[in-house]
């Protein structure tokens, strides 16, 4: 459950973003990842927390125009999650495995962002279009 729930949360996050019109989806996600960057400000790494937040803010700002930067920012947050999990200072002090869960969830969101932050129907249509042109081979189900 420690792995499945965070993956499902990441997939749900991407699916719910389908409800946001495409023109607003990237700016919304840039704001979300900027907020995630500030989540550890009192996390125990002192001045490094401020430097990390600064780097995340820069990546989020660049993300206003680039899904790639939003994906990179989520991967940066993943590294910070792992460090906090190992250090023993979880993102939610009352939930010991919260940073571990976040470290599993964040790459799912990052992959979606690196794929262009498309809506679930758009991703499905792209996948269906790609597989429709595939040749049938002996042994394939009819």
Image (tube, grey):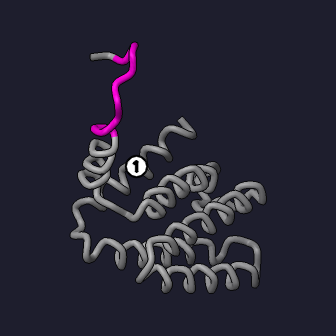
Quadrant occupied by the C terminus: top left
Question: How many numbered marks are there?
Answer: 1
69 displayed left or right of 125: right
Q: Residue furthest top?
A: 139
Residue 84 to residue 95: above or below: below
> On the image, numbered disc 1 is attached to which residue?
11
x and y, in percent, of residue 134 in the image: 34, 35
Give the residue drawn at x 28%, y 42%.
128
Residue 76 shown in magenta: no
x and y, in percent, of residue 19 in the image: 22, 61
- Numbered range of the magenta stretch: 131-140
Residue 60 to residue 135: above or below: below
Give the residue drawn at x 49%, y 72%.
70
Chief secondary structure of the magenta portion: loop
Residue 91 to residue 46: above or below: above
Q: Is 138 or 8 nearer to us in this picture? A: 138
């Amino acid at each position: 459950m420690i792995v499945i729930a965070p993956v499902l949360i990441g997939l749900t996050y991407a699916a719910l973003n389908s409800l946001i019109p495409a023109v607003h989806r990237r700016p919304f996600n840039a704001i979300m990842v900027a907020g995630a960057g500030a989540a550890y400000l009192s996390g125990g790494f002192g001045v490094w927390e401020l430097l990390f937040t600064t780097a995340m803010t820069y990546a989020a700002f660049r993300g206003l125009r680039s899904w790639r930067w939003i994906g990179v920012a989520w991967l940066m947050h993943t590294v910070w999650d792992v460090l906090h999990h190992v250090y023993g200072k979880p993102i939610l002090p009352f939930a010991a495995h919260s940073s571990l869960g976040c470290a599993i969830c964040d790459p799912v969101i990052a992959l979606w962002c690196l794929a262009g932050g498309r809506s679930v129907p758009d991703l499905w249509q792209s996948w269906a279009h790609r597989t429709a042109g595939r040749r049938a081979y002996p042994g394939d189900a009819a």
